[in-house]
Image (cartoon, helix red, strand yellow):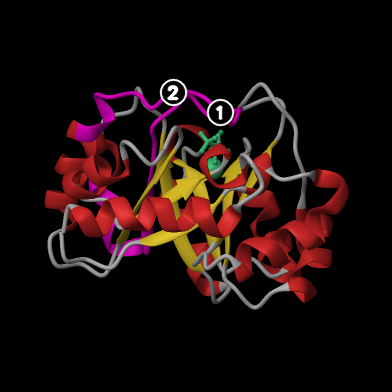
Amino acid sequence: MSRSVKIAPSILSADFSRLGEEITAIEAAGCDYIHVDVMDGHFVPNLTLGAPVISSLRKITKLPFDVHLMIDPAQPYLESFANAGADIITVHVEADVHLDRSLQLIRSLGKKAGVSLNPSTPAHTIECVLDKVDLILVMSVNPGFGGQFFIENQLDKIRTLREMIGSRPIELEVDGGVKVDNAARIVEAGADVLVAGSAVFSGGDYAGNISAIRDQLSRHS
Ligand code: DX5
Ligand code: ZN
């Protein structure tokens, strides 16, 4: 497990009344990406935030904004998320019959293109777009809420995707239920970016929480 693993705290678990300070705090705590969950109350049973919020947060940090769009449709909004300052824009395969076009559009806007799969969606559904993605996001919970349990059978999918990726420059990100006690297994299966919401924000010691995850990874490397 020599790969260098990135930690992407999901701000879904942050205190939304102090979002700017929370982002400053996780940056100081040593995270790599800021994971932003955008939900529409239609593709997933929850509502969060949109491009205007990302745009105001943009001045708080230079860290990459890893924007996870759980919205259907996504295509009409891609340009506004790009203009708001997203660095990686991820769309769901289940929410886009013209996935190829959306991925091309994201790249044409100068952003990294990501594709995400729900737990029930098999790996092969993205086989034909591998040349157009910079990141694959495996949902290891059913999207919509933080603080759920990791769905164990997603480890097989992570392994399959790692093989499918081969030597392509694609990051494999895992999102949902990532904790200190399963992080090493997830990375062993092939992940190189771990999204962690409740695991980073619980208890208030963000630096301690992030280093607890990193410690586990180095113990297994
Ligand atoms: C769920 C979101 C996740 C979530 C992760 O729909 O995509 O990013 O916030 O939260 P935890 O790490 O608490 O499962
Ligand atoms: Zn997410």
Q: Residue at x 70, y 26 (%)?
A: 46
Which amino acid does the dot numbered 1 rest on? Gly
Q: Secondary structure at mark 1?
A: loop
Task: Report how far apart the C-alphas of labels 2 and 1 lie in the structure.
Answer: 7 Å
Amino acid carrying mark 2 in the image: Phe
Which quarter of the figure has residue 64? bottom right
Q: Residues within 10 Å of mark 2 (few under 14, many from 20)?
A: few
Q: Does the Cβ of the disc 2 residue fall within 8 Å of ligand 1?
A: no
Residue 122, above or below 19: above
User: Over which residues does the magenta segment extend?
Assistant: 127-155
Q: Identify the image quadrant of the N terminus.
A: bottom left
Which residue is label 1 attached to?
A: 147
Give left or right: position of 28 versus 104: right
Q: Is residue 35 visible?
A: no
Mark linked to residue 65 = none
Q: Quadrant of residue 172?
A: bottom left
Residue 214 place in picture, x, y as percent: 36, 58
Q: Residue at x 21, y 55 (%)?
A: 219
Q: Secondary structure at mark 2?
A: loop
Is residue 17 within the magenta segment? no
Residue at image x 62%, y 70%?
28
Does 154 appear in magenta?
Answer: yes
Identify which residue, 24 or 78, lies in the foreground: 24
Q: Which numbered tag is attached to residue 149?
A: 2
Q: Residue reaching furthest right?
A: 17
Image quadrant containing the C terminus: bottom left
Ligand 1 resides in the quarter of the picture at top right
